[in-house]
Amino acid sequence: MQIRTTRRGFIRAASVCAFASYIGRGVAGAMEQNSTSDGIKIDAIELGFPLVDFHVHLDGSTIDKVLELSSERGVKFGIVEHGGTKENKYPVVLSNDEDLSAYLKMLEGKPVYKGVQAEYNDWMDCFSKSVLDQLDFVLTDTMTFPGKDGRRMKLWEKDADIGEPKDFMDRFVDWHIEILSCGRVDILANVSWLPAPLSSDYDAWWTEPRMRKVIDAAIKKNIAIEISSSFKLPKMPFLRMAKDAGIKFSFGSNGRYPNMGKLDYSILMAKELGLKSSDMFDPATKRHKMNGS
């Protein structure tokens, strides 16, 4: 019997493994400190800007329950739902203006940022500009990848066939560039994540030229890079290169209830990088620029 892995289950397992790998670096104590509401509020004061988790899913919960966590943890949430064609297989996929409008109505008046997680390179065809303009931000990633047979391949699933590693890596970097060029995108999430066969050699596969290529594309399109607390990525060399290039950053937990707002790695990296409010993605500034007002 073939066992299918959901993205939610994969992320949970990956988070546990990534956490364990950081124990040896002495990060565990810092993460434990940041696991409490008081610790997070102290972190916000130390950083000098409000904490926002721009990668929050409502799976298995309700907006009201999630807002209770937002208040308790002192973190504002950016809510996302998958958006794109029905070829993208998730419990909920917003695929037209009616779907997106109903989702926006559900979030109306709530103290959250309203976003979608754009899927693949054809998601823009599903929605009109007038409805998309009601969003605060659009987040996307590259974890759904075109297989050589043309079908969409979920790279986190065990049966994902990536083929020859170097060839895959070259195609994967090019896929980042294509996704970043697909219309309105504000945040690239899960940055520098690798499929299981390559993940143990992260530093070897994410060479300086490959990192530079992705960073340059994000800079060109004015797209922020997520510091992911679920995958503990990107690693510091990637982050330093991005900061030196002048890129904006966002924090993300990729959290499902009750794990949203847990931003330990994001906060730790921000402190090491010396990030300031001017380094962070701001939906108000982005929308102001996009609307030309």
Image (spheres, rainbow, N blue to C red):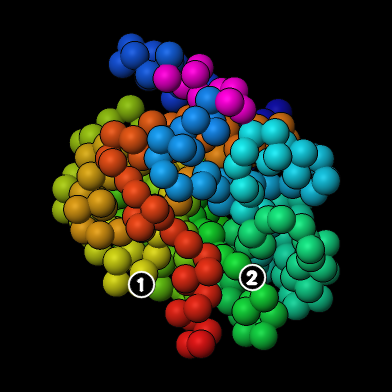
Rendered residue at 72%/60% (across/down): 93
Q: Is 256 placed above or below 83 here?
A: above
Using the rendered image of the protein, determine whether residue 175 is visible from the camera's viewpoint.
no
Using the rendered image of the protein, determine whether residue 114 is visible from the camera's viewpoint.
yes
Q: Is 162 placed above or below 267 here?
A: below
Task: In this rendered view, identify the residue nearer to me: 128 or 262.
Answer: 262
Identity, as a three-letter code, of the amino acid under mark 2: Leu
Crowdedness near tag 2: few (<14), some (14–19) or many (≥20) residues, C-alpha within 10 Å = some
Q: Magenta region: which residues?
A: 30-38
Q: Is residue 48 magenta?
A: no
Q: Which mark is residue 196?
A: none
Secondary structure beneath dot 1 equals loop
Q: Earlier in the sequence, mark 1 or mark 2?
A: 2
Q: Which mark is residue 221?
A: 1
In this rendering, the label closer to the viewer, 1 or 2: 2
Q: Which mark is residue 135?
A: 2
